[in-house]
Each structure stands twice: as C-alpha cells, then as structure tokens.
Amino acid sequence: MSFLNVGHKINIDIGNYCNLSCPNCMRSSISKSYNVENNNFQNHPYLNKSNITLENIQNWVPKKFLNERVKYVDFCGALAEPTLSPHCIDLVKYFSPHVEVISMSTNGDTRNVVWWKELAKVADNLVVRFYLDSFKPGNSLYRQSNSSRIIEHIEAFTSFGGKAILCNLVFKHNQDEIQDFKDFAKKLNCNYRMMVAREFTTNESTSYEVDYSGKKYLLEKNTLIPSNVPYRVSLNSTNPSEYCSLVHENMIRIFSNGLVMPCCHIEGQLFETYENFFIDENDTAPNLTRHPQFIKDFVSKIEMQGGIKTISLKYNSLEEIFNSNFYKTYLPLSWKLKSNEICQNCINGSRLDIKDENEYNNPLIVDIPKAG
C-alpha cells in the first residue's frame, strides 16, 4: 500500500505558540506532565520557541508537489494558534495559488482588527474557522478567551469579504446559546457549525475537573447532543484502511518541527515517547518506559527503519518519507495482520460528530471536504 497519492489534504501546525491554556489541549497535558516530573510550573520547554518559516515550507512542500498532489491545506494542529505566527499571511499567500482551499482554525483572540481585515483580503480560497466558547461574559470556561474581542475580529474579517465558519463546541455551560450562535452566523452570512466536545467519546464520561489560575470547576458534557461515535464503529469496520484519515482523507499531517505524523490522535504519545528529541534533536532515543502499546504498534517500526529522523522533513522529502518502510510496508502490514491495536481501536470520529446547520451556510464558502 502507498499512502502517497493525489488530492491530498495537508494538515499542518505552523508553530508552537498559543495565547490560551485550554484545559484539555495537548499543550496543557504535556506541560503538566513535565512540571510534575521536573518540579516546576511553566510551559513545556518545547513550547513557545519556534514557527515554521516560508523557507521551511518552500523546502518541505515545494510548488511542484502542491500542484501535482495537494487539494487542501489546513492550518490546524495540536500546539499552535496559527495567527500568532509572524509568517501566517506569507504562508497563506504561498499555498493559496496551488490548492483549491486553504483554511485555518483559530481562537480569534489574537492580533487586532486591522490585521484581521488584512487577512480577509489575502486569498479568495481562504476559509477561517473561528472557535467561540460563549457570548456571555465570564462563561468562556473551556477556551478562557475574550469573547467580545473574538466577536470584534470575526466581524472585521467578514466585513472585508473573509469567508468564515463560526464553530460552536457544545458543553453544558454553553448549550443554551446555540440559537445565539445561529443568529450571529446568519447576521454575518457565514457558516455555522455545531460540534460535540471530543472529550466525551463515551457515555461513561460526563465531566472533568479544570484547574485554571487557581480556580477549580467542572466542564460538563452537554445534555442535548449525543456522544461522538468513532468512524470505524459507524462503518462497522475493523480494517483501518477503510477509516484511517491517511486513506479516506489522504491526510498528510505535518507537526511544528517537521515530523510527518501518521495520525493526529497519537501525537501526545509520540511526543512523550520522543520528548527529548523535541527539546534537542540530537537526542533521538525513545523513552521506552511509557505507552507500551504505542511502543509496539508504532515506535518499534519507526526505530526499525532508522529512528525518528526518518519521518522528519528536516532530513527527508515528503516522497522519501512516504516511500519509507514505515509508511509503505510496516504500518499497512500491521493493519493487514490486525496486529496494530491502536489502529484497530481508533477513536477518530472523523467528521461524523459535526452537525451542519445548512440553512445558515453561505454557498460561496467551501470548507475542506474529504480529499479524493
């Protein structure tokens, strides 16, 4: 099996900076683990250190590769708020002429009105997903952001022709505002999208405690929308080639340090296993004391072909990475043999947990569909 195809969707973290501290974000979890082990209270030393530059992207994803193999580019990742990158607009300009759609996910609580108006004019095929937690003052319990400033930025972006999607991540504390979200999206002529919080993937999980700036409270599951269903369950399949985003979305997932990840759902485990490499790329040895199943299913195969640098764009081209033994032989074979338990039990909900309100959709806006 070859994962290198045409019609790819590139999902990329263009840096490792963020202005928020969302409680269930990978940034928060890796910082918490590091603080416990190192007896201090600060961001993980990998964070807030780097941004992918235009030169990086020109080398990693050349125009020829874009023109021949890529349909969509999405600035959406595990660690970065893309609008904080000083290269954000330059990267949009680079990708835009070579793909059908370029998009980004943002908390919207960055920059200023002037910058958002400028972004709106950069590319006709740019779609920005704004994630707003609540319209009520003091009710942004998940993203802990400034709602009034986000609203101001969405209005500025759309008033200058920017194509936007208003994303409503529904918890119990904001479920009474669904109609407010719909009305606001309709007013701005942008798409509205309702999503179930991915934290609640089973009916057993109904809440979790948050400790933010010394204040503890519960984030609770909404009572209106059903739990997410893993994509493999909806397909009644145990064959990852039928539900893995590498296949059904032709996904290429690029991490902020150039690693080409096989899956966004294992990034936390990969980070913790190769934590020293993320801090200092001269230290490539994996930590084999954590995540034994992940070690068996993924790390053993990465190490068998030469180690973590073999899936890094700093040392290899995209073609070389996808033609490596890990991607071309070891991973597909583990699917065929049903020996990869993590993939067999994939939690990816794909886009089946997204509730589109089509009556509020602007037909001029093209969000990223499945690549093909």
Image (cartoon, rainbow, N blue to C red):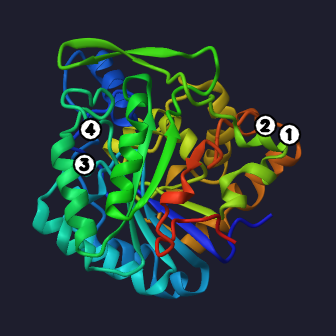
User: As shown in the figure, which amino acid type bears the numbered disc 4?
Assistant: Phe
87 lies above or below 19? below
> Which residue is label 2 attached to?
233
The location of residue 353, given as percent across then percent down, is 61, 42
Q: Residue at x 54, y 87 (%)?
A: 67
Tag 3: amino acid:
Tyr
How far apart are labels 4 and 3 at the CA level? Answer: 25 Å
**At which x and y percent is residue 123?**
34, 80
Most foreground residue, 230 or 171:
171
Q: Give the mark, 4 or 3, whose residue is nearer the N terminus.
A: 3
* Distance between the alpha carbons at the discs numbered 2 and 3: 35 Å
Q: Nearer the viewer, mark 4 or mark 1?
A: 4
Question: Which quadrant holds the N terminus?
Answer: bottom right
CB under 8 Å between discs 2 and 4: no
Please say if 339 is above or below 252.
Answer: above
| Helix, strand or loop for disc 3 | loop
Q: Is disc 2 placed on a helix, strand or loop? A: helix
- Residue 135 numbered tag: 4
Q: For the C terminus, which image quadrant? A: bottom right
- In this picture, is 269 found above or below 261? above
Tell me the element at label 1: loop
Quarter of the image holding residue 323? Answer: bottom right
Dot 3: few (<14), some (14–19), or many (≥20) neighbours within 10 Å? many
Q: Are marks 4 and 1 in contact (CB under 8 Å)?
A: no
Q: Amino acid at mark 1?
A: Asn
